[in-house]
Structures are given as structure tokens and as C-alpha cells.
Amino acid sequence: MFANIFTNNKASAYSSETIDILRLIRSENVGPKTFLNLIKFFGSAAKALENAQDFSLKGGRSKPIKIYSKDAAIKELQALEKNKSYLITYKDPSYSKLLLQIADFPPVLSYKGDISLLNHNKTIAIVGARNSSINGKSFAAKISKDLVKAGYITTSGLARGVDTAVHSNSLGHTIAVIAGGIDHIYPPENKELYNEIAENGLLLAELPIGSKPLGQNFPQRNRIISGLSLATVVVEAGLKSGSLITANFALEQNREVFAVPGFPVDPRCIGSNQLIKNGAHLLESVDDIIANIVPKDRIQKSLEEQVGCFSNIGFDMRNSDDIRVTDKNRAAVIELLSASEVAFEAIVQQSKLELPVLYAILLELELAGKVTRTAGNKISLIY
Amino acid sequence: MFANIFTNNKASAYSSETIDILRLIRSENVGPKTFLNLIKFFGSAAKALENAQDFSLKGGRSKPIKIYSKDAAIKELQALEKNKSYLITYKDPSYSKLLLQIADFPPVLSYKGDISLLNHNKTIAIVGARNSSINGKSFAAKISKDLVKAGYITTSGLARGVDTAVHSNSLGHTIAVIAGGIDHIYPPENKELYNEIAENGLLLAELPIGSKPLGQNFPQRNRIISGLSLATVVVEAGLKSGSLITANFALEQNREVFAVPGFPVDPRCIGSNQLIKNGAHLLESVDDIIANIVPKDRIQKSLEEQVGCFSNIGFDMRNSDDIRVTDKNRAAVIELLSASEVAFEAIVQQSKLELPVLYAILLELELAGKVTRTAGNKISLIY
């Protein structure tokens, strides 16, 4: 279908910035949120890499965090290449503008297939039960076909049931986000579908090539499915299903949620009916989606607005060398924290520290694995 | 179960007021709305009967309207008695307070069975497809049983499918409103259910005993099903179904509507899903009903508030003999009317007539069959 613009990339062809970004996100205690705070603080992955170990020591670790070596990064890129897969970072123009707007976007993604789909942005997630009914699958198939006809692309998770119906009925216009590394085909019976999407669609993975997914990786993956998408459609979903997790991510990410209703006797409808009760759009046909989403509104923010430096604090964070933090400052901040979440604003107010100093201390603690940040920039101490 | 308090009534035992009310509503050109306007204007059915023919002539008829004779009324009451059925008027304390609140409540109802159910008021209508699915029927059965357990009674239309499931699963606590006369059993296969409800529930009919229903009588009947009820539940309903008509009546009557969702591939769900899209509560279990209705709020209005004389116009309508209407006044009002609906307030404003005079003229025209009133007190001329 489309020519793959990265097909001829060699590992050696990646820029040093890409390699730095890859090294930083794969370093110890650096998740997507800490990554973003590091970039905002230091201005670049290179400078963050230079300082991360020192910060982790200042934050209270006895040994510095492990930094992902340049060698390891090159090896990862070579392994990808061998698998006809490639790496893209959040700074690439092909990276999804929609995904970039979520608080914990993945700084790097491995991919296989047609990368031009990633920044298509008229993307709709469709998720549902693995044990979906015949009707559930045929409905998912119809919605997928109708979305493609209307100029949209689909995204889903390559699972059994609804996911499979979605991908196979929108080939050429579908993105599968997998929970393990880009080479980890799950479920095994979807090997052929995986290959078809590689040829005629796009496969994405957040974990390094070669990784097998742990349980916690599935919800992490789901935030990408919803984050890539203007809206998430739930076709059949039980009460404690992964599909509901995806729908909740979509809501947190300020995206629309559509749910297909079902007769209440079927347990596969309990989740979707609950979503409708809680305000999701009732979905009967693709017209409901088109009538309720406005793609343009969603993709206008600039990269700088989304992941620029901390702004409006009267200090250019890129001059971070000038920030002086004392042990007394650190002790004062730790004193304010506890196992219960505290809003960042409350810490600002009560610590009475300069903002750059406070940012530095919190970064140190993050890198030392002493604090965790949750949605809404709330901070708690890890004991 | 309950002793029938009217069981020993003879036709001769009905009050003269009951007979007057029966005669008035059965008279030519007197429907429920005109009946109510006549009562508000003349203060009693007796006085309305005295004046109705004269008013119809003033309104432009060449022959006066036919008044239902006292003989005919007595015969109707005797026929009811023979069928172990009885008559109740809106002035009886056993009449439903909820039904009395709708704009076009039936001034008389024939009934058979336990009249104490009529003013129970914790009444929920459950309606749905005649060709309902097995799941639809079993869901209707479950909701009906659960409502009875929670102290509610059900009402429905004795039709095939959902209606049948409702009545037969809430026997002793169910009201069936039939579209023909009280003796008209439809569909014929529900004869046994009809008899069970007569023994153990309540049957109601607006049409005179012996009447076979015309097509238009079914929607008229549906307004009573919803009007008797705090809420209407729609179990399965196609797009142009009687159940949707009932739901729309419920909305007009300011009652709650609940709809059971269904997977969109089933045409029996299109109507109920549409209702949810338009704001009906999604119903999964009886808990949804209990959580969303407040019975007490609905049954507090007094009879006087609901069907008292025209109020707050500085004139006691019971002195209607004092109202002088000229031919010029009549011509002026007719001049203002047309086939398109006009709001009553607009006629008040533009005619510049005293309100009692205007009420009289409109009543004359109603009785003459020259005008019709629709919801919201809008008036149009019949050509």
C-alpha cells in the first residue's frame, strides 16, 4: 500500500538525540512521567543522562541508578532492524499528535509496518471482549469497515474476539498496539493477522523488543490505544474488563467514549451499559461517532506547548546548572510528603522554596525511587 | 385477595353525579379535554349537560349535539353489572391521583377486579414488543416480580409478548388497561390471563362496554397506561412501536422513562436504544427504578388544584350565566383562528376579550366540532 519511509534505516542512521532519548527512557527508575519531567528540567535527553545518576544519589540512593548504555541502545536498534522493525521517538514528526497530549505518552515506540498511520489522527480505538459473541464480532467488523469508508483508521490490541474483528476488517487502515515487545505475537493464533498488519497497517510496542508482557503491561498498553485515538468504542465488556480500563484512560485523556448497549442478561454487556449510564455515548452506528467528535479540535497543540520546558515560572530551566539545592531544602520537602498523595501546589505553598529548587528536589526523589507521581500531579512517598 | 368494595353495587346505586359525568363524556363532540373545560366552565356535569346543546348551536352547528340519555347511561351501568364490571369517575376517591394529573385523564373508567389497586400510585408501567424475544419476556418477568417485592404494582396493556409476561408475573399487583370495552378480550389467547387479572388484579377500560377498539383507540389507551404510572419501562421496542408512543406520553406527562438497552443488531432494540439516547434512564435492574423515582412528589396535588374551576381570573366561572357573548365576539375569535395551531395566550392577547367570554366562545366552538385543542393548550380550526 504505502511505501515505508523508514525501510532503509540502519541502526547507525538514527540520530544521537534518538539514541539519547532511548537510553533515558530505558534507564532505571525512569518511566514516561519522570522522563517528561527530566526533559522539562534539563531541556534535553543528553543533559538529563549526564545528571541522572548524580540526582539519584542526591535523592537518597546509596548506588546511582543504572543508565541504559549506548551499546545496549545500539543493540536494541539492531535487533529491531533484524526484525524489520524500527524506533520512533516523540520528537519525530511522524509521532502521533494525539498521543503526545497524554500525560504519560511513551517517549519511544518500536514499530513495524506503515508509520504514516501513526500521525493520521483520525483514529478511533475499538476494544471489547476476548470472548465476544458472534453479534459482537460482526458489529465490531461493521463499525470498522464503516469507519474506514468515512476516512478514519482503527486501533486496537490484537487480542482475540473484538480486537481481531477490528483489525481484520480495517486492514490497511489499522494500528495494533501490542503489550509485549514488537516481536511478541500474542495470542499465537493471531500470527497471520500480525503479519498482515505488518504488511498492511502498523504494529506498535512500548516495551523493548524481546520483552514478554507482564500483567501490569496490559493496562499500560491500553493507555496508548486510547491515547492514539479521538474516541474509544467499547463493543462488549464485562465489569472488570480491560476494555473498561481503556475507556477510563480515554476519559482521563479527555477523549470521547462510545459504548454499544446490550440486553442486560448478557454479562458481556454489563460494562458497556455501565459506561452509558455514566455518560458514554450510546453507539448504534458509525454516524454516532461522526456526529460527536471534532477531529480538528484535538490536534492543534504544538509540540512546545505539550512537552516544552516548565513555563511561566520566571526561570529558564535550561540553565539548571545555576540551581542550588541544600540538604536542608531536601529534608524540608521530604518532611512534607507521606504515603498519602499530596498536591504539588500544596508542596509549593508549604515548602516556600523557589520553584526550580523544588523541581530539582522532586526529580532527585523520583530518580532515587523515593516518590511517585499520579494523575493530576499528586505526589506520595514510597516507603 | 381483597374484598371488592363495589361488588354489591347495582346500577341504581350510582349517584346522580356519576350518571351526569357518564352522560357528559359519552355525548357528541365531548372528549376528555372538552369534558374538563366544560367542568371548569360550568362547575358541574349537570350544568354542562343543561347548556351543551345550546353552546354547540352558538358555536355554529345547524343541529345541536347528541346528549347521551339518562336511559343509555343506566343501560350501560346495567350491562357492566351483568359482566361483573363497574364504573368509576374521576371524583371517586379510588380514582388514581396520578392519572388525574394528566391533561386528558378519562372522566370515567369501567373496571373489573380489585379497584383498590387504582389509587395505589406506586405503579410502574412496563410495555414492550408483542413479538418480544425469550430474553425480553424473561427480563420483563424478572422486573415485574422484583417491583412487586419492592412494594410496587405494574400496569400494562394485556397484549402478547412483554405485556403478558408483566401481568402474569405480578398477579395480584397488576393493572391491565384494555383498548376496547371492558368485555373485549384481546388477543383472544389471553382470555385466561384476563380472567386471572379480574380475580387477582384490575382491568380498566375507557371505551363503553361492548366497544371493539379502532386503531386510534390504542394510542389513547396508552396514555392511560403511562398516566397511571410513576414511570414507564420499555423492554423491547421497534422504531414505530406502540411502546414508544407510551414512552412519549410518559414524557409529556412529566413522568420518568426507563428503557432496557439492546445490542443494536436486533430491530426490537432500536426504539429502546433511541429512548436512552434521548435521555431515558438505562434500565438494568429494578434498583435503577427505585433510585430514580420519588413516589411522594407525584401524588400531592389536591383534586381542586388539578380539576378545579379556571382559577385566578377574577371571576367565579360557576356564575357562568352572567357571561354575555355577542355574535361580534364570536366572529372576532374565529377570525383569529386557522388550521395552524395558535397558542391560547395569543388569542387572549389579540382578541382583547374578557377571559370568561373567550372561554365560553372556545367551548361553543369545541362542542360544535369546529376547533380542536392539542397539548399545551394550542387551538386550531377544523375545516
Image: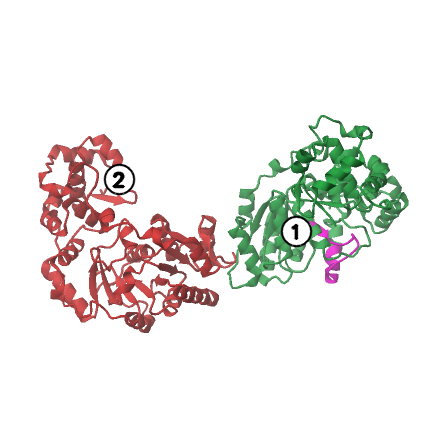
Chain colours: A green, B red
Residue that carries the numbered disc 1 in the rendered image: A170
Dividing the picture into quadrants, the one containing residue B16 is bottom left
- Residue B65 pos. (x, y %): 13, 50
> What's the residue type where badge 2 is placed?
Ala
Q: Is residue B35 above or below residue B154?
A: above
Question: Is residue A295 visible to us here?
Answer: yes
Q: Residue at x 57, y 61 (%)?
A: A268
In the rendered image, the quadrant that contains the N terminus of chain B is bottom left
Q: Which chain is home to disc 2?
A: B
Residue that carries the numbered disc 2 in the rendered image: B339
Q: Which chain is home to disc 1?
A: A
Magenta segment: does it hold A180?
A: yes
Dividing the picture into quadrants, the one containing residue B370 is top left
Q: Residue furthest top?
A: A314
> What's the residue type where badge 1 is placed?
Ser
The magenta segment: A175-194
Question: Is residue A260 visible to us here?
Answer: no
Q: Is residue A63 above or below residue B199?
A: above
Q: Say few, some or many: other residues with alpha carbon within 10 Å of mark 2 (under 14 / 14 to 19 / 20 or more).
A: few
In the rendered image, the quadrant that contains the C terminus of chain B is top left
